[in-house]
Amino acid sequence: MRRKSPRGKPSAEPLTLHIDKLSHEGRGIAHHEGRVIFVDGALPHETVLAQLSSQRGSYAEANTLEVLSASADRVTPPCPHFTQCGGCSLQHLSSAAQLRFKDEALHERLSHETGLAAYQRLPVLSGEVLGYRRKARLALRYVAKKQRVLVGFRERQGNFITDMQSCAVLDPRVGTLLVQLSELAGAMHARESVPQIEVALGDTDTSEHGALVVRHLQPLSASDTERLIAFGMAQGLSIYLQPKGPDSVHKLYPQGGAERLYYRLPAYNLELAFHPLDFTQVNAGINRLMLDQALHLLDPQAQDKVLDLFCGLGNFTLPLARRAREVLGVEGVAAMVRRGEENAARNGITNAAFVCADLSLPPAQHPWLQQGFDKVLLDPPRSGALEVLPALIAARPARIVYVSCNPATLARDAAVLHEHGYTLAAAGAMDMFPHTSHVEAMALFLPRNR
């Protein structure tokens, strides 16, 4: 009989494991000697040789050493850095299987929390799976042994930076420049005090389509700023500096003009401006599909007054304003409220207004909730919208469209809405982050007995 290792000290002997399914984080799930084992790099229906990395009571974690019997859904990862880089977790799974995994993950959550199954299952919104990512934070670190600066994402396990030459999921405008960025940072006097670069990209055919925000812990020398300007000129990218907190960000190159990037929504005749550090959707193609689906489900009519909660810079608000009589966007960050107003003016929209409000406060703190709304769209953070749901339920809008970046809180909030008279009419996943286990979703709620 094999002797068990003490708790917390995994056995050095590899295990042969059969994988039953994927966890919500995208790791294989196996069972061994009464313990659940989460296996990195393994897929459902595979038999793998795995090495335990940790164990805690009823479960353990392991890494795949060898695939003994491969799944039909296993593919060759498109990125050579996949096995080390923590930016992606599912590149070894076919795109079709990734969509099935995200679809099942969403509906399992909804069924478990609500007990409902008789709603319309919307097709997963999907698009390009490579070169899609327009926003990212790249880590930088000078490694003396290698005599160069590493630029990329953190490794899967630990805080080390992956030694990357390119990134398959980043937009090629930056994803193909990691070697050049490494050389740029390595030539700077401040190479040991530049911990990160924020990437922000808009549409390619706009006046300023991309920016790098360089975080630096020490003042930059004149030659360092010259190097950054030359890099921006050569690559057609704007360069911003961040010496302290987010409020310290300022444009270095090109001088003059607004500190803005731009993306277009042609179906709604809109061009939206954003600061490089503003929240925007990372996947432009899925964002357009998401907007079309949201407006289809909400079905705004010319006489409707619509409420858009957690509205950001107006990504949903302004398309809604093209269809509805009036739209009120509510957002907790004052700078984003100003951006929404700026974008409304930029696009000649006069029937959209914006309010800054903390939506975690009790409904009594929000007088604008008393105005009455025909339909509501909400796009909350990962924590969900639990605090504002009582006010929405009391207002009894004819339709509620809930856009979610966390199926767990969507399912929780769906159960609350169901308990208080709203039926889950439709729901579907969105593949906003291909090759990761991250699931975004959208759901339509209709009042019962209306």
Image (cartoon, rainbow, N blue to C red):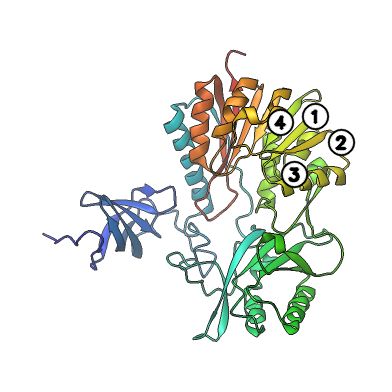
Distance in Å between CA atoms under marks 2 and 4: 15 Å
- Mark sitting earlier along the chain (1/4): 4
Which element is circle 4 on?
Answer: strand
Q: Nearer the viewer, residue 107 or 239?
A: 239
The amino acid type found where label 4 is placed reads Leu
Q: Which disc is residue 307 wearing?
A: 4
**Relative to 290, residue 142 above or below:** below
The amino acid type found where label 3 is placed reads Val
Q: Name the residue under label 3.
A: 337
- Mark sitting earlier along the chain (4/3): 4
Distance in Å between CA atoms under marks 3 and 1: 17 Å
Which element is circle 1 on?
Answer: strand
The location of residue 299, given as percent across then percent down, is: 72, 28
The mark lying in front, picked from 3 and 1, is: 3
Distance in Å between CA atoms under marks 3 and 2: 15 Å
Q: Name the residue under label 1.
A: 326
Q: Name the residue under label 2.
A: 350
The amino acid type found where label 2 is placed reads Thr
